[in-house]
Structure formats: structure tokens, C-alpha cells
Image (cartoon, rainbow, N blue to C red):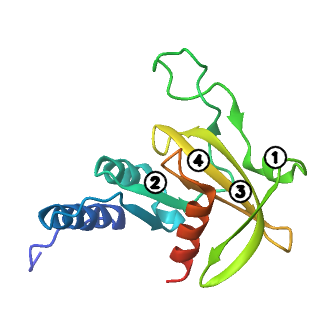
Amino acid sequence: EKYGWEFRTKHQLGVELLTWFKQLIRVLGVETKLWLAVDGAYAARPFLLPVLGLGFVVVSRLRKDARLFDLPPAGSHGNRIYGKNKLSLANRAAHQKGWNTITYDCRGAEVTRQYKTFLATSGLVSGQIRVVIVRFEDGTWAPYFCTDPAAEVRAILEAVAARWAI
């Protein structure tokens, strides 16, 4: 009270910082697509919706029990945001078929890993996301998502690796 500070959550502070940054680069005349790699704690609607409104593409870790749905039926003309069928990341990761291999830059070193990718709909962003499940050498797996459904798997994994390099 002495300093007139008002409590704000980390999500609110992050949105304020990104709003300032977006205004700054606009003043400088920089035109680019902005990607933001964040920790899974920021994979929440109060953070994602305002950041997506600013035009950022967000890449983050996804909870293994995330509530995901398939895509809405073709021809629904935008009446449906979500598909009817719930998707299970654990079931997809456990299934032995459908894994692809990719080599990408992970913190300055080329690594080769197995992955699965698919489009899903999520309440986190009220729309489509690209999901990438990565399987590590020890058999464990981790899910990530990108708010740009057209994003390439390599770009998503390199953004995640860059985030963890901090």
C-alpha cells in the first residue's frame, strides 16, 4: 500500500511485458512473426488468449492429461470449435505404430528422436493446436504444442530446446 502497487499474477505480468514488447517493435518498424517458447506453467487460458491476441505463436509443454479433442467435422462452417471425440496423449504415446524420426538442433547438438504429431482442438486456445509427442531414448515421452497448426515439427522442437537451454 505504501508504494501503490497492485497485485498481479505472473500471467498478467507476462502479458503486460509482451504487450510492451509488441508496441516497441511496432514503433521500430519491425515486421516479423513472433514465436514465444514458454514453460508449461504458462500454458493457461489467462496467459494464452491475450498473447495470441497480440499475434504471438506460442510453443509450450503440454500436460500429459491435457483435455484435447479431435477436429470438428468438415462442413461444420465454424459452428463447432471442438471435435466430438476426446484424445488421450497417453494412448497415442503408448501405441507402437506411427512414430517418425527427426534430427534437429537441440542446444547446439544434433539429436535424433522419435515423434508423433497431429492436430487437435483445445480449450486452452479455443481452437486448433499442433501437438508433438517426443519419445526419448529411455522410452519416456513428453508432449508439446504449438498454437500455429501449420508449424513444422522441427521448428517446434527447436523452440522447445531453445527454451530449455535458458
Give, as a three-letter code, the residue at label 4.
Arg
- The residue carrying mark 3 is 133
> Which residue occupies the foreground of this view, 31 or 162?
31
Give left or right: position of 47 versus 15. right
- Please report whichever mark, 4 or 2, sits nearer to the chain's N-terminal start: 2
**Residue 44, which numbered label?**
2
Give, as a three-letter code, the residue at label 1.
Asn
Residue 114: image x %, image y %? 79, 62
Which residue lies at the image location 56% right of the left edge and 62% below the top edge?
155
> Contact (CB < 8 A) between labels 4 and 2?
no
Residue 3 vs 48, above or below: the answer is below
> Cα distance, mark 1 to mark 4?
17 Å
> Cα distance, mark 3 to mark 4?
10 Å
Which circle, 1 or 2, is nearer the viewer? 1
- Please report whichever mark, 1 or 3, sits nearer to the chain's N-terminal start: 1
**Residue 4, which numbered label?**
none
Which circle, 1 or 4, is nearer the viewer? 4
> Cα distance, mark 1 to mark 2?
23 Å
Give left or right: position of 164 versus 138. left
Give, as a three-letter code, the residue at label 2.
Ala
- The residue carrying mark 4 is 130
Give left or right: position of 110 versus 24. right
